Image (spheres, rainbow, N blue to C red):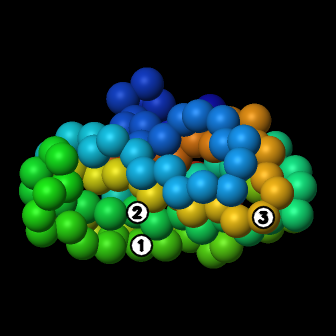
């Protein structure tokens, strides 16, 4: 089926939770274990309020991100009732990845989901799974 992922159940989820106030949310490191290009998707769910939301993707060779933390990419700032899924391709040469989400202002989000998909997944750009 065009526009769907061949194996979405195997995608690594870096964050999947509601955001209810202006805060910094640092996700738990998730083992990705592959060096190479990956696609990261950020689905802001339904965000309301006067806010900004920045999502940065980080990598490390240790699961607690105690050393060797690198910035792999950053999504365009999300603001004012955004609902569109954003995608970016990054090169990951670390074993672990995490999402760091910084929100400011008055924000309510039902569920912000950040997902990593390895390059061998069948995907079509600019469609939802």
Judged from the image, the secondary structure of the residue bearing numbered disc 2 is strand
User: In this orientation, does residue 40 appear?
Assistant: no
- Residue 126 to residue 79: above or below: above
Q: Which residue is mark 3?
A: 105
Q: Position of residue 78 (x, y in %)?
A: 72, 66
Q: Of helix, strand and loop, which one carries label 1?
A: strand
Residue drawn 18% across the image and 47% down it: 64
Q: Nearer the viewer, mark 2 or mark 3?
A: 3
Q: Return the residue nearer the eye: 129 or 51.
A: 51
Q: Looking at the picture, does residue 4 appear above or below residue 53?
A: above
From the viewer's perspective, tell me whether residue 42 is left or right of residue 28: right
Q: Position of residue 47 (x, y in %)?
A: 81, 49
Q: Nearer the viewer, residue 115 or 1?
A: 115
Q: Residue at label 2? A: 57
Q: Position of residue 103 (x, y in %)?
A: 65, 61
* Distance (Cα) linking label 1 and label 3: 23 Å
Q: Quadrant of residue 112?
A: top right
Which residue corresponds to the image point at 71% horizontal and 48% vertical from the top-left?
Answer: 21
Image position of 62 with respect to 54: above or below: above
Q: Position of residue 104 (x, y in %)?
A: 70, 65
């Amino acid at each position: 089926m065009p526009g769907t992922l061949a194996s979405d159940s195997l995608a690594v989820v870096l964050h999947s939770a509601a955001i209810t106030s202006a805060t910094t949310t640092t996700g738990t490191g998730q083992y990705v274990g592959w060096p190479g290009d990956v696609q990261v998707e950020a689905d802001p769910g339904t965000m309301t309020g006067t806010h900004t939301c920045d999502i940065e993707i980080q990598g490390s060779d240790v699961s607690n991100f105690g050393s060797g933390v690198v910035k792999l990419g950053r999504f365009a700032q999300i603001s004012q009732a955004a609902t569109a899924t954003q995608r970016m391709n990054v090169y990951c040469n670390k074993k672990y990845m995490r999402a760091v989400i910084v929100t400011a202002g008055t924000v309510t989000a039902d569920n912000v989901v950040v997902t990593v998909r390895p390059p061998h997944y069948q995907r079509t750009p600019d469609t939802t799974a």
